[in-house]
């Protein structure tokens, strides 16, 4: 089954390095469906993936109507959106999970 949430990054927002591995959640893959059109690399808000040594291996600029999927756990982050950016980086994000679907309001 899958779950989802809406994420909105505006000026100064970022997400620190993490791997989406949460005990008991049984996450096997993560996804990001980007809804923001016209996003520019210089604005920040990039989805970065890190190698074993902590260096950036790959970075993706948000593109409207684009779905990114990746295996969990995998170290990644969203870079800081610049202070002068007026647009919002909006996405539907979530995880593909194994086990029994807890249903609405479940964990």
Image: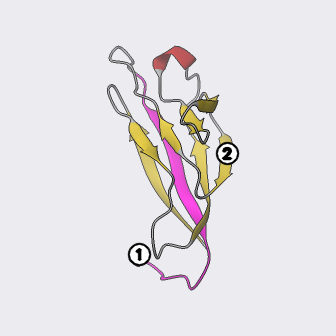
| Residue located at (55% from left, 35% from top) | 47
Q: Which residues are magenta?
A: 87-107
Q: Is residue 64 magenta?
A: no
Q: Position of residue 72 (x, y in %)?
A: 60, 58
Please name whichever residue, 23 or 86, is drawn nearer the observer in this view of the structure: 23
- Which mark, residue 67? 2
The image quarter containing residue 27 is bottom right
Q: Are marks 2 and 1 in contact (CB under 8 Å)?
A: no
Q: Is residue 98 magenta?
A: yes
Q: Is residue 63 visible?
A: no
Q: Position of residue 9 (x, y in %)?
A: 40, 35
| Residue located at (53% from left, 58% from top) | 94
Mark 1 neighbour class, 10 Å CA radius: few under 14, some 14 to 19, many 20 or more:
few
Q: Is residue 94 above or below residue 56?
A: below
| Residue located at (32% from left, 17% from top) | 83
Q: Is residue 103 above or below residue 13?
A: below
How far is disc 2 from disc 1 in space, using C-alphas?
A: 24 Å
- Which mark, residue 107? 1
| Between marks 2 and 1 in the image, the one whose residue lies nearer the viewer | 1
Q: Is residue 9 visible?
A: yes
Q: Position of residue 24 (x, y in %)?
A: 46, 76
């Amino acid at each position: 089954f899958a779950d989802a949430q809406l994420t909105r990054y505006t000026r100064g927002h970022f997400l620190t390095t993490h791997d989406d591995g949460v005990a008991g959640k049984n996450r096997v893959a993560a996804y990001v469906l980007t809804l923001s059109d016209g996003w520019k690399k210089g604005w920040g808000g990039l989805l970065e993936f890190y190698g074993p040594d902590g260096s950036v291996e790959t970075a993706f600029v948000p593109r409207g109507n684009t779905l990114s999927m990746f295996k969990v756990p995998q170290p990644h982050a969203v870079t800081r959106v610049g202070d002068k950016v007026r647009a919002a980086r909006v996405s539907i994000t979530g995880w593909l999970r194994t086990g029994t679907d807890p249903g609405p309001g479940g964990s």
